[in-house]
Image (cartoon, grey):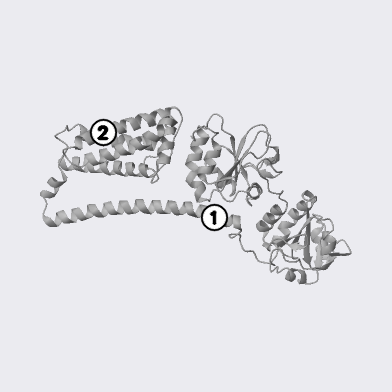
Amino acid sequence: MTVALLVTRALLALVFGIAGAAKLADPAGSRKSMVGFGVPAAMARAFALLLPLVELACAVALIPVTSAWVGATGVASLLTLFVAGISISLARGAKPDCHCFGQLHSEPVGAKTLVRNVILLGLAIFVVRQGPSGSGASVAELFSGMDPLTSAILGFSALFVTFLALATWLAFHLLRQNGRLLLRLEAVEQKLGMNAPVMPGLPVNSSAPLFHLTALEGGKATLDTLREAGKALVLVFTEPGCSACDALWPEVAQWQKEYAAHLTVVPVSRGTLDENRAKNAEHAVKNVLLQEDRETANAYLVTATPSAVLIVDGKVASGVATGGDEIRALVGRAILPPPVKSGDPAPAIRLPDLDGEPVDLASLRGRRRLLLFWNPSCGFCQQMLGDLKTWERNPPGDAPELMIISAGSSEDNRQQGLRSRILLDGSFAAGQVFGAEGTPAAVILDETGRVASNVGVGAEAVMALASPPGKPVA
């Protein structure tokens, strides 16, 4: 029994020592958790400091046998408050972030959190019921009954476990700090254009090579004649017998129709007139040009089909986009509206939701909205996912409506478990127009559909935009 009591005290001391130290290392998170459990914002700062100090005091008191009963009583009292607070929150349907172990482990409260605290409460009561004089053996008494070798091994093992726990804690904080630095570095690199992917092809802003090609519909076409309309030009290089080119052909016809006011899409193929006319019979793609061999493709450094190059004002405006996905992204970027800033109306960008229903951002009027730029594969997004879910369940009274603009597939986004409407933007087109430099990032649209804030990048900036002035973040 005495050894069992000593082990129980050591376990409780370890748990509360780690919890107290972790909370002290993250005062902002502790304050936020206090507010989530209903502590008034004005008192949250004091409570966020007091609680970890009490936890550490109880952990220290549990070690000496003379003060172990007092420490166990304190731990039992704290755990009773924790169990009551968690139970009340769950009964109300709220799941605030427990922040039980600070940055080491933090998640919305649930049945698992409640069970863990009930088990710890049972252990504390086990020590308390023994009375002030029955708290078990002291550490000295435990070692006194052992031979020197066993005592040395046990002591070394305890020191090693303690060292391992501290090293793990320090490594976690170093990695977290490194993550914050990487986020800032990524934003700087994106602003400077340093991390733009290097695409094959001619240098951007170099003069586009001239050509003089036969048109499928008859006559000749040159770069200059195609530029006369004053629109951006996309050359799509294809080959007869290329199955990926054939699969893209219906989309080329669709782009020519939908984007005719802003973009000229010109396929450049090779082969005979008859085989290209046969290929084009079903979809009626316009402006098909024929090269004799691969002279035009070679001039633009195109080595595979299907590929595409964007030309603006007679200059190369992109690298070579190869394959259907890259070409779609290139066309999507080519038709983007100009960047917007605070005070501008939301641009006309149509994006599908998870069910395929299109939404035009220019039509978002009638209420204040928070556009959140998201990526399920972004580690920084995943770090704030719990906070975002908590905010969704219990947003401040005057909070904006959340609309998420996300990369990734429908399935990846459904697995996030978010309640708000999600629009899919695989090429990050909307983010570029609004000036988002990474994910997570957010911007406010007012009731008239105008941009009403600067872009906030990072979890802290996003959650600040999610809560109206004067309202604490849930």
| Snapshot quadrant of residue 34 | top left
Residue 361 placed where, x, y %? Answer: 68, 41
Pick the front one: 224 or 377: 224
Residue 109 seen in the figure: no
Q: Which residue is mark 1?
A: 186
Write down the quadrant of residue 226 in the picture: bottom right
Q: Position of residue 283 (x, y in %)?
A: 79, 54
Secondary element at image label 1? helix
Few, some or many residues within 10 Å of mark 2 (<14, 14–19, 20+): many
Res 295 → quadrant? bottom right
Question: Mark 1 or 2 closer to N-term?
Answer: 2
Q: Which mark is residue 147?
A: none
Residue 474 in percent (x, y) is at 48, 34
Q: Mark 2 and mark 1 in contact (Cβ < 8 Å)? A: no
Q: In the displayed structure, would residue 174 be above or below residue 456? A: below
Taking depth in this image into account, of 344 and 378 the one nearest to the observer is 344
In front of the other: 174 or 122: 174
Q: Residue at x 77, y 49 (%)?
A: 258
**How many other residues sit within 10 Å of disc 1, few (<14), some (14-19) or many (≥20)?**
some
* Count of numbered badges drawn on the protein: 2
Give the amino acid type for the residue marked by disc 2 in the picture: Gly
Q: Secondary structure at mark 2?
A: helix
Q: CA distance from mark 1 to mark 2?
A: 46 Å
Pointer 2 residue: 74
Question: Which quarter of the rendered picture does the N terminus lie within?
Answer: top left
Q: Is residue 271 left or right of residue 415?
A: right
Identify whether 256 is placed above or below 31: below
